[in-house]
């Protein structure tokens, strides 16, 4: 018995020296984090998600006094990076920053290496991103009503771009077609560069863009805006009507960015992370930065985030089934 006590004492001392949790002691929120945290981002460096990831990582590093490291793992419609987190230890030290693609992927891919619901614990969203429907100047219509009438009168005349099959802007346009009775040709792209090149040249005529992407081209007259999916007019583009104002109410499609953890991560740790991320995105400088890019700060409790994801999956399922969209990674 005395030898066992000595062994446990030595093991505890070694754990403390290494900054590890004590043996036999469950880690709660009070001692989290006590080492660096990895934030897996399933998108490439330099993309639209990366700056937000690094902003959040910097703020959490300051808040926690522990380094939050951004780990970009792009590829396969976010599946590669997401799988890394699904198989990570459920201790709160590996987190996933992902988009609404997480809710649509299980509907699009039949052979995912993880379960999008069972293998993850929702933490909190961080923002909503509304869409603006932009058109090449060659499109004669200047309002959403005019465009819908023209597209219905000439089915198959117009083509629209997306950032890839099953991407949020692809699903959004499929929903648009369902609600308006219009039929257009879908042209998927693998990168934003080629997409914008073809859109600006008129090779494709329409695109559901996020505001920060669209604004420079709208200001130069290279594109025109037909409407936004926001509930109220966006401060960045006050002259652009919402879909509801333009006669198309009930268009609820939008994208979001949020944080997930591996399933079985202790709930006190989940709650601590959610609360601290909420603190970060309530900071005036962080809010201002997001709003300046057309992103609406949005944090919730883990349970509210889980409910929102479930609702999104149901909405995606309705559109994906109707449009018969199916992919393989």
Image (spheres, helix red, strand yellow):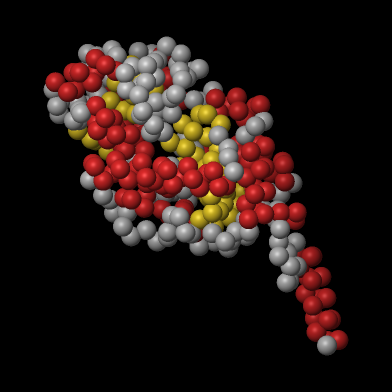
Q: Is residue 198 visible?
A: no
Of the pair 198 and 102, the residue shown nearer to us: 102
Tell me residue 251's x, y (percent). Answer: 35, 29
Tell me residue 264's x, y (percent). Answer: 57, 61
Of the pair 126 and 302, the residue shown nearer to us: 302
Q: Residue at x 14, y 27 (%)?
A: 155
Q: Is residue 245 visible?
A: yes
Q: Is residue 324 left or right of residue 89?
A: left
Q: Which residue extends farthest right?
A: 2
Q: Residue at x 32, y 54 (%)?
A: 109
Q: Residue at x 74, y 46 (%)?
A: 65
The quarter of the picture where the C terminus appears is bottom left
Whether residue 290 is situated above or below residue 221 in the rendered picture: below
Residue 289, picture quadrant: top right
The quarter of the picture where the N terminus appears is bottom right
Q: Residue at x 37, y 16 (%)?
A: 245
Q: Is residue 18 left or right of residue 76?
A: right
Tell me residue 274's x, y (percent). Answer: 62, 45
Q: Is residue 277 left or right of residue 183?
A: right
Whether residue 278 is situated above or below residue 306 in the rendered picture: above
Tell me residue 150's x, y (percent). Answer: 18, 18
Whether residue 244 is situated above or below residue 117 in the rendered picture: above
């Amino acid at each position: 018995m005395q030898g066992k006590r000595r062994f446990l004492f030595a093991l505890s001392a070694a754990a403390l020296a290494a900054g590890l949790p004590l043996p036999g002691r469950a880690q709660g929120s009070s001692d989290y984090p006590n080492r660096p945290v990895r934030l897996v981002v399933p998108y490439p460096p330099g993309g639209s998600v990366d700056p937000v990831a690094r902003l959040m990582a910097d703020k959490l590093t300051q808040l926690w006094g522990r380094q939050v490291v951004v780990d970009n793992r792009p590829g396969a419609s976010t599946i590669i990076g997401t799988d890394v987190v699904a198989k990570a230890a459920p201790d709160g030290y590996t987190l996933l920053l992902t988009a609404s693609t997480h809710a649509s992927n299980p509907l699009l891919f039949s052979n995912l290496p993880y379960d999008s619901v069972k293998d993850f614990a929702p933490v909190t969203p961080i923002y909503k991103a509304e869409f603006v429907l932009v058109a090449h100047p060659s499109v004669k219509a200047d309002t959403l009503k005019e465009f819908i009438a023209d597209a219905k009168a000439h089915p198959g005349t117009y083509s629209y771009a997306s950032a890839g099959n099953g991407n949020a802007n692809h699903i959004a346009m499929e929903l648009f077609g369902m609600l308006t009775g219009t039929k257009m040709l879908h042209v998927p792209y693998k990168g934003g560069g080629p997409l914008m090149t073809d859109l600006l040249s008129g090779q494709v005529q329409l695109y559901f863009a996020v505001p920060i992407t669209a604004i420079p081209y709208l200001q130069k007259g290279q594109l025109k805006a037909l409407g936004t999916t926001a509930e109220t007019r966006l401060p960045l583009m006050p002259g652009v009507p919402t879909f509801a104002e333009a006669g198309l109410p009930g268009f609820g499609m939008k994208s979001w960015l949020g944080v997930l953890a591996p399933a079985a991560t202790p709930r006190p740790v989940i709650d601590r992370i959610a609360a601290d991320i909420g603190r970060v995105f309530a900071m005036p400088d962080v809010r201002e930065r997001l709003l300046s890019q057309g992103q609406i700060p949005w944090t919730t409790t883990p349970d509210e985030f889980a409910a929102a994801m479930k609702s999104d999956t149901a909405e995606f399922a309705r559109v994906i089934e109707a449009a018969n969209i199916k992919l393989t990674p």
